[in-house]
Amino acid sequence: MSTTDIGPKGPVGTVQDAVVDYVEDRTGAKTGITWFLKRNIPAETSWFQTLGFAVMAVFGLQAVTGIFLAMYYKPDTTRAYQSIEHITNDVTFGWLVRGMHKWGASAMIVLVFLHMARVFLFGSYKYPRELTWVTGAILLIMTMFMGLTGYLLVWDEKAYWATVVAMNITASAPILGPYVADVLRAGSEFNGDTLSRFYSVHMLAIPGGIATFIGLHLFLVAKLGISEPPHSKRLARARRAEEAARRAAARERLPYGRQEVTVPAKDTVSTEAGS
């Protein structure tokens, strides 16, 4: 039996097509996804441009493993460390999930730094992508803070004193430092409220903020496009053509303004003085 019938207004598709059309008519989701996935990227894009996706993939891994760990973790000063031991030693594959979460946190921080280093070295932070750079810097700060809040949750000697040092450094900052440290500690000393506060911030506030800024970051990347690498041949041809146009305008004593410049290999770029 055919899944497609002929109706009074033409072919009638499958139930799946009907559902897709229903959602598309009311949300435009299909159009948005197509716009995001089928955009043009520079021909000479390399593996360096995939570091951002690697960060997003690791963040997804952290979210999944974090949900699993939260099912067994007890944010209480008398039971936190014991719950970690229970996850590691008793829960099926708990040692694996905890290891993935632990090393995934380190990998995410390293990948974020590598990604921002690539953006800086390639000059991808320049006009018109300044806001993309700003959102990336905010994501870096939130990633570091998520690592700090998660480190204390083990509640052993190493985690405790490392966090004490971090709070003392925060308190030494001028003007707002002591107040920020008291807010993070939930008081002047470390106690059960400190652990609960770090747990809630680590599980809810920071992941929500990271997810929001990742969405904004991806929107800006899709809207503004990926910048060409500095070694791009097409970009080099465009620069040579721009310089040739400057010299030609100088010889003819013409003001060098906005003009169309023909680039070898049938490329045409628009240049401006001072660009």
Image: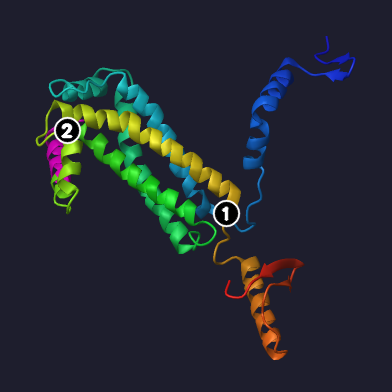
Secondary structure of the residue carrying tag 1 is loop
Q: Quadrant of the N terminus?
A: top right
- The residue that mark 2 highlights is 186
Q: Which residues are magenta?
A: 154-167
Q: Earlier in the sequence, mark 1 or mark 2?
A: 2
Q: Is residue 5 magenta?
A: no
What amino acid is labelled 1 in the image? Ile
Q: Quadrant of residue 240?
A: bottom right
Instruction: Determine if residue 263 is in view.
Output: no
Which residue: 66% across, 82% down?
246
Q: Quadrant of the C terminus?
A: bottom right
Q: Quadrant of residue 79?
A: top left
Q: Position of residue 94 (x, y in %)?
A: 31, 23
What amino acid is labelled 2 in the image? Ala
Q: Position of residue 85 (x, y in %)?
A: 20, 23
Q: Is residue 46 above or below residue 163?
A: below
Secondary structure of the residue carrying tag 2 is loop
User: How far, Cα to Cα, is label 1 from label 2?
Assistant: 43 Å
Disc ID at residue 82: none
Label 2 environment density (alpha carbons within 10 Å; few <14, some 14–19, many ≥20) = some
Residue sitting at the far top: 1
Q: Is residue 90 above or below residue 137?
A: above
Say which of 17 and 186 sits in front: 186
Which residue: 17% across, 22% down?
76
Which residue: 50% across, 42% down?
216
Q: Quadrant of residue 194?
A: top left
Label 1 environment density (alpha carbons within 10 Å; few <14, some 14–19, many ≥20) = some
Q: CB of mark 1 within 8 Å of CB of mark 2?
A: no
Disc ID at residue 226: 1
